[in-house]
Image (spheres, grey):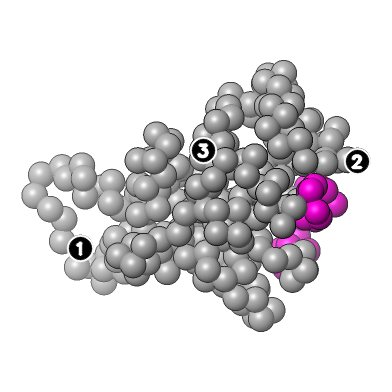
């Protein structure tokens, strides 16, 4: 899925929302964007990668006992732990949950973006930035749970209304019905809003100590400014 937002003086217009798009189409859309938000882990936890590599040659050194913290370090990236600390939301584990399948596709997509000449920096400093819609909604004071699934249509519609009220400058236009009907379409719009925040310095970035791991694991950009503040950016 993709969503494209054009930022104009005083307003932001959704120009496209498309579901079930190919990787080639994502690369094409990113080529014309200032910043592209990908709602998917950009990498795996470094300890997990080390485990797989050493396990392959039979040299894994497990700690004594069950080692709960050891397993947690394998399952979650540094950025996942930051999101948990900042929002209370625990991201899905790219090493131990089904989101790993999406990460497989993302790894190929990142390679295609790099081959296309786009600056792929997993820290988010280049053309691409990792986003997490639920965490962004949380930071913006909006509902971030209970709006996905066939039985949550009413909650989903209420959330879209709340987003539009918090961002009256956002014009969904011809795509409003789709965004209200599909949580995937809604998430893609939120991802584009977070990409705008990242592009204008209104989202978190790894510090010097975190950057080493983020270069391989990826870094989730959390909004650091209220959603209403993006209006001022649009008017600039």
Q: For mark 2, what is the residue?
A: 174
Q: Viewer-proximal residue, 68 or 165?
A: 165
Q: Residues within 10 Å of mark 1 (few under 14, many from 20)?
A: few
Which residue: 67% across, 53% down? 233
Q: For mark 3, what is the residue?
A: 139
> Where residue 153 sits in the image (x, y, percent)?
72, 22
Which callout, 3 or 1, points to the residue nearer the camera? 3
CA gap between label 2 and label 1 equals: 55 Å
Q: Are marks 2 and 1 in contact (CB under 8 Å)?
A: no
Which callout, 2 or 1, points to the residue nearer the camera? 2
Which residue: 40% across, 61% down? 206
Residue placed furthest toward the right:
174
Which residue: 15% across, 61% down? 61
Which residues are the magenta region?
A: 5-27
Q: For mark 1, what is the residue?
A: 60
Which residue: 30% across, 53% down? 74
Secondary structure under the numbered disc 2 in the rendered image: helix
Label 2 vs 1, first from the N-terminus: 1
> In the rendered view, would you say 222 is above or below 156?
below
**Apparent side of residue 59 relative to residue 18 in the rendered image (left or right):** left
Tell me if I can see residue 139 in this picture: yes
**Apparent side of residue 63 relative to residue 109 in the rendered image (left or right):** left
């Amino acid at each position: 899925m993709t969503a494209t937002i054009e930022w104009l003086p005083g307003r932001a217009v959704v120009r496209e929302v498309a579901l079930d798009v190919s990787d080639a189409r994502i690369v094409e859309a990113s080529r014309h964007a200032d910043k592209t938000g990908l709602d998917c882990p950009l990498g795996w936890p470094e300890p997990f990668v080390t485990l797989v590599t050493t396990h392959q040659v039979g040299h894994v050194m497990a700690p004594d006992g069950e080692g709960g913290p050891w397993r947690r370090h394998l399952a979650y990236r540094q950025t996942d732990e930051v999101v948990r600390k900042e929002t209370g939301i625990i991201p899905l584990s790219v090493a131990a949950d089904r989101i790993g399948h999406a990460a497989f596709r993302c790894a190929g997509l990142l390679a295609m973006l790099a081959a296309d000449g786009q600056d792929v920096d997993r820290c988010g400093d280049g053309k691409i930035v990792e986003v997490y819609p639920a965490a962004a909604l949380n930071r913006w004071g909006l509902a971030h749970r209970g709006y996905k699934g066939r039985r949550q249509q009413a909650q989903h519609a209420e959330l879209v209304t709340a987003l539009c009220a918090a961002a009256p400058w956002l014009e969904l236009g011809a795509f409003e019905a789709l965004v209200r009907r599909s949580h995937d379409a809604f998430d893609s719009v939120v991802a584009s809003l977070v990409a705008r925040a990242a592009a204008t310095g209104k989202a978190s970035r790894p510090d010097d100590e975190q950057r080493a791991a983020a270069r391989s694991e990826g870094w989730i950009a959390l909004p650091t400014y209220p959603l209403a503040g993006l209006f001022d950016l649009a008017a600039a």
